[in-house]
Image: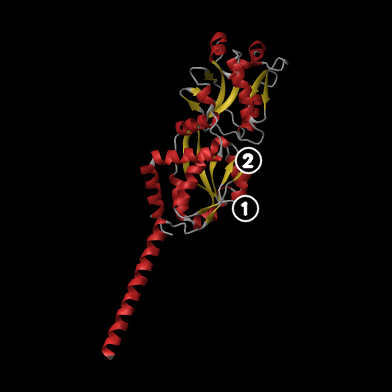
Amino acid sequence: MQLGIKSLSTKVRALGAISLLTLSLANGANATSQPGNGTLIRPIFSSVVEERFRGEIAMAGLQELGYQVAEPKETEYATLMLAMAFDEADFSVHLWDILHDGFYQKAGGDAKLVKVGEVIPGVLQGYLIDKKTADDYDIRSLDDLKKPEIARLFDIDGDGKADLSGCNPGWGCEPVINHHIASYGLDKTVSHHRGPYFALMADTISRYQAGKPILYFTWVPQWISGVLVPGQDVQWLEVPYSSLPDGNKGVNTTFEGKNLGFAIDKVMAVMGRDFAAQNPAAKTFLSLVQLSAGEESAQNLKVKQGEVSPADIKRHAQEWISANRDTFDGWLEQARATIN
């Protein structure tokens, strides 16, 4: 009888050990597949709805890695850098590497933040006019707008000056445009119209559709270039020479042989430095997230056509992930392989 009891006890201990081992292996597998392990991560994005798409892709991957992703805060570019620097947010995918460098440096630069990857390489900015007016009057350069008779072609408010549809106050393009107008001696012939960018561009597109000359600033990726197609409907204007507010003359501003006046840039993923150090899996994943300017422009056109709700944009992101699942899974695998 004693032998039976001892034998049963041994079996119970053995089964218990197997159960603990199984649980330990399961927990280990879960830790490997979800290294985020419920850690809260706080995104912060720009308030431009057309830029939410890339953020939804990033958030979807972080969720698959086991992070608890908070609802993103939305603000202007300068403020989102400060929020990460002062531990009010953890990551963004909205830093233009060169255009927003002033915001980055004022927030503490590399001491407080870390640029972890190129979300969109090869992004452009510049000035465009409608191709008909360009060809009719042989307008190829911003310098041509010094001529009062040329500037008057783009006059909307009747003051004799060309009206340039510019960008929002507080955006990185605002000081560059203002600098260009002063540097190129255009103060007397060009007015920079600032305000809600897409409202300004709605008026600009309406003017174009009515057969009137247009002059505007834009960037790529973005849906505007899907409606006003460069080389077909509109053309880029050259600047007479490179001149940026920080005096940096070593930056490349040339695209397809034209000096556009703005740095040929890239959109970066950026994180709070301390958070990045504590969460290497998130850092690795965000360093790999990348889509082309064309892919984001195509999604932006869907937004322009009315698919603008948060649910629409989340669906766009999921469709992109499904179409690029092998690549996306590769990013996740590399993040999971990161030593925590």
Quadrant assignment for the N terminus: bottom left
Residue 21 in percent (x, y) is at 35, 70
* Image quarter of residue 192: top right
* Residue 72 visible somewhere in the drawing: yes
Amino acid bearing label 2: Glu
Residue 66 in percent (x, y) is at 46, 55
Label 1 environment density (alpha carbons within 10 Å; few <14, some 14–19, many ≥20):
some
Residue 316 vs residue 146: left or right? Answer: left
* Image quarter of residue 49: top right
Q: Nearer the viewer, residue 313 or 255?
A: 313
Q: Distance between the Cα atoms at labels 1 and 2?
A: 16 Å
Q: Earlier in the sequence, mark 1 or mark 2?
A: 2
Relative vertical location of residue 68 with respect to residue 150 in this rendering, above or below:
below
Disc 2 designates what residue? 76
Relative vertical location of residue 255 with respect to residue 320 in this rendering, above or below:
above
Which residue is at 62% across, 33% downward?
Answer: 245
Disc 1 designates what residue? 86
User: What secondary structure is found at the residue carrying circle 2?
Assistant: loop
Quadrant assignment for the C terminus: bottom left
Residue 322 vs residue 125: left or right? Answer: left
Residue 112 in percent (x, y) is at 57, 51
Amino acid bearing label 1: Phe
Q: Residue furthest top?
A: 136
